[in-house]
Image (spheres, grey):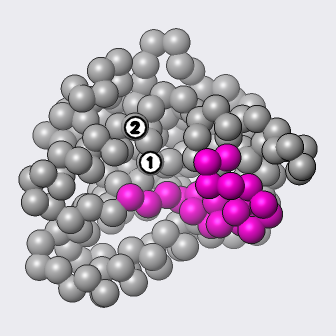
């Protein structure tokens, strides 16, 4: 993936991965860089939309945990229930994201780097892919927010695959730190 720079965020649910990714994107955009926000879970989100979840039920931290009034399960439960796709092919979500980046890069044909910000790096193989493609994984942490360990996606990525741990008590400072290490 020529001319693509990947910044991946790891961390427990509720730590602020999406919030920090938006702040990093803002800084990169103000710097004149091209930015795309992607997610390893994008195929799961598309399936959740197809099943009847509204976008807010998939992305809003509070709504994501609440049972859907008709379906009876939360968007998080629905998407975690589709983890069999990872069991069928461990790199399923990596290949889907990689294909999207390659298609986007070919369409844009830009001369300066495309920064891809991934706000949901949750598995070792995803972090290995980021690193193998010249990217950097940042683990976000904040007092009082820990991994729940209730699902495979709610466990920490191997620390040996992490470029740096970033305290997100202050979102702007955290984004500035990641921006400086890009």
Q: Label 1's element?
A: loop
Task: List the residue tagged with mark 1.
Answer: 119
Point 67% across, 26% down: residue: 148
Residue 85 visible in the picture? no
Q: Label 2's element?
A: helix
Q: Which mark is residue 19?
A: 2
Q: Is residue 20 above or below residue 133?
A: above
Instruction: Check disc 1: other Cα within 10 Å, few if <14, some if 14-19, many if 20+.
Output: many
Point 67% across, 37% down: residue: 63
Magenta: predominant secondary structure element?
helix
- Front label number (1 vs 2): 2
Point 79% across, 51% down: residue: 78
Q: Position of residue 141 (x, y in %)?
A: 42, 24
Q: Position of residue 42 (x, y in %)?
A: 57, 62
Instruction: Check disc 2: other Cα within 10 Å, few if <14, some if 14-19, many if 20+.
Output: some
Q: Is residue 164 above or below residue 131?
A: above
Q: Position of residue 17 (x, y in %)?
A: 44, 38
Residue stretch in magenta: 37-57
Mark-to-mark CA distance, 1 and 2: 9 Å
Residue lying at the far top in this picture: please name it.
144
- Front residue of 161 and 59: 59
Q: Is residue 104 above or below residue 127?
A: below
Q: Is residue 24 above or below residue 48?
A: above
């Amino acid at each position: 993936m020529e001319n693509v720079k990947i910044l991946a965020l790891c961390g427990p649910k509720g730590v602020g991965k999406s919030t920090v990714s938006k702040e990093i994107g803002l800084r990169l955009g103000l710097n004149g860089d091209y930015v795309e926000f992607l997610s390893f879970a994008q195929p799961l989100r598309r399936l959740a939309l197809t099943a009847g979840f509204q976008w807010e039920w998939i992305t809003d931290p509070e709504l994501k945990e609440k049972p859907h009034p008709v379906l009876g399960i939360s968007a998080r439960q629905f998407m975690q229930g589709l983890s069999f796709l990872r069991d069928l092919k461990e790199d399923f979500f990596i290949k889907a994201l990689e294909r999207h980046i390659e298609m986007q890069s070919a369409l844009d044909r830009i001369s300066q780097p495309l920064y891809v910000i991934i706000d949901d790096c949750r598995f070792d193989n995803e972090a290995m892919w980021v690193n193998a493609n010249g990217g950097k994984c940042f683990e976000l942490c904040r007092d009082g927010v820990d991994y729940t360990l209730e699902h495979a996606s709610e466990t920490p990525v191997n620390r040996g695959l992490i470029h740096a741990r970033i305290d997100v008590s202050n979102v702007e400072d955290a984004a500035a730190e990641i921006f400086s290490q890009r």
